[in-house]
Every structure is written in C-alpha cells, then in structure tokens.
Amino acid sequence: MSRLLHATGLDVSKHDGSPPPSALPILEALRPLLQEATAESPPARKSALALHLMAALGPAIAASIHTSVTRAAAAGQALSGIDLPLAAESIKVLVLAVTAAAPKGEAAQAAVMRVLVPLLVEVAAPPKGSPAAPMLRDMAVKLVTAMPASVSGAAFRTVVAALPAESKQRLQLALKDAAAAAAAAAASANVQPAAVSGIAGAASTSGSGVAAVQVQKKPAIALKMNFAVPGPAKS
C-alpha cells in the first residue's frame, strides 16, 4: 500500500500535508471505475480493484483535505482553489465506494464511512471561525440527510454514533442552519406580490371587470430533515 501511495504521489508524508498535484486527476480516473463497480452485475476484478485503490488512496486524500480545512480555518477562510474540486471529487468517489462495498456487508461499508463521514463534517461544519464553502456544505448536508434511509444507513449511523462529541455538535448545527435556510426560502417563495399598480383602475375603465393581477410563485421544496445526529453521551 505504501508503494502505491508513493507511485501515485499521494504519500502525504512526502509533502507538507497539502493535497499533492496528482490527487484530483487520480480521483477523476477512479470514479468511472467505481461507477462500473456499482453496476447491477459489476465485473468482479474491476470491483475488487476499485475498492482496493479506494482503501489505499481514500484515507491519504481525506487527511490532506483535513489539513487544508484546518489551515483555512486558522486564516478565517473557506476552502478555495484546487481544494474545492478535490474535496467535491473525494466525496463523490467515497459515496460510490460505499455503494460498491455493499455486497461485502455492513462492516465493509462502515470502513468506507469512517473516511467519508469525518470529511462530510469538515466541509459542512468547518472549525469555529472558518466559513463553509457553500457548494461543499450543501453537498454534505444533502448526503447526511439522505444516508440514514439509504442501503448504507446502518453503517452510517454506526459511524456517526462513534464521532467525538464536538464533531456531532458541529454537524447538528450545520443541519439546523440548513433547515432554517430552507424554511426561510420556502416562506419567501410563498409571498405573493402586490397587485400590479393601475390594473384595477384600467380594468374598471375598460369594463373588463378585472380587479387585479396576482402573481404566485411555486413554493420551494424545503429540506427534509429526517436525521438527527446522536447527542454526546451523558457521563
């Protein structure tokens, strides 16, 4: 495994902890392989190879993203530059890996979740003082909301339950903020504009009988919060 990391340039011990330049193209090449592995009847060898590569590369890439988030937080900034597409691609690849691991059982899915879930926490709720990148935050919140009801729900809940109390609290706050934003958007979409000025008078003059024109917008779909992060264990 160490030879594979060295060959791909993903051995973070050889860098300053930042994502190496080879990380993004490797993930982009790995995603189609994992997509094949999640097909209804995936080629056994390709599926095994995809999971082996993900097991070797996933933790190294997640560790480098964690370093980037920590540095951005120290500067009071959100992730930017190459870190943005790298984090997004990492999440997509890890979600595919969870699905590809399903035939091997909950333990295999949980192994991938232990890499994915902390990464979701990092991008949805960065350390205090650091703003979240909107694209990554929305992606993470949607996944965290949907996963409990998915085929990998049991593995997801197991990993979330084992998170440190501080991580659970950060995730709870991110979900709460997302729900509030969705509710505000839905309320705003339901507001009907006032009648068009002058229409009533013009209508009465022309005898058309039209008193006013109202424009009604369709309500936005509010985020369905069907997941509650377990709270810290009571001592």
Image (cartoon, rainbow, N blue to C red):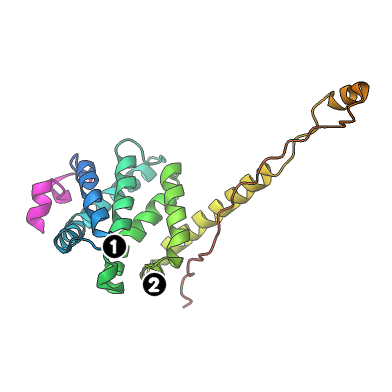
State whether residue 86 is above or below residue 226.
above
Foreground pick, 66 / 219: 219
State whether residue 99 is above or below residue 123.
below
Reading the chain from its start, which is encountered first: label 1 or label 2? 1
Other residues around mark 1 within 10 Å, as few (<14) / some (14–19) / many (≥20): few
Foreground pick, 126 / 208: 208
- The picture places residue 183, in percent across and down from the top left corner, at 62, 51
Magenta-highlighted residues? 1-19
- The picture places residue 41, in percent across and down from the top left corner, at 24, 63
- The residue carrying mark 1 is 40
Quarter holding the N terminus? Answer: bottom left
- The picture places residue 47, in percent across and down from the top left corner, at 19, 61
Tell me where residue 76 sits by quadrant: top left
Residue drawn at x 45%, y 46% is 129
Q: Label 2 sits on what residue type?
A: Ala
Q: Label 1 sits on what residue type?
A: Glu
Foreground pick, 221 / 117: 221
Other residues around mark 2 within 10 Å, as few (<14) / some (14–19) / many (≥20): some
- The residue carrying mark 2 is 154
Residue 65 visible in this rendered orientation of the protein: yes
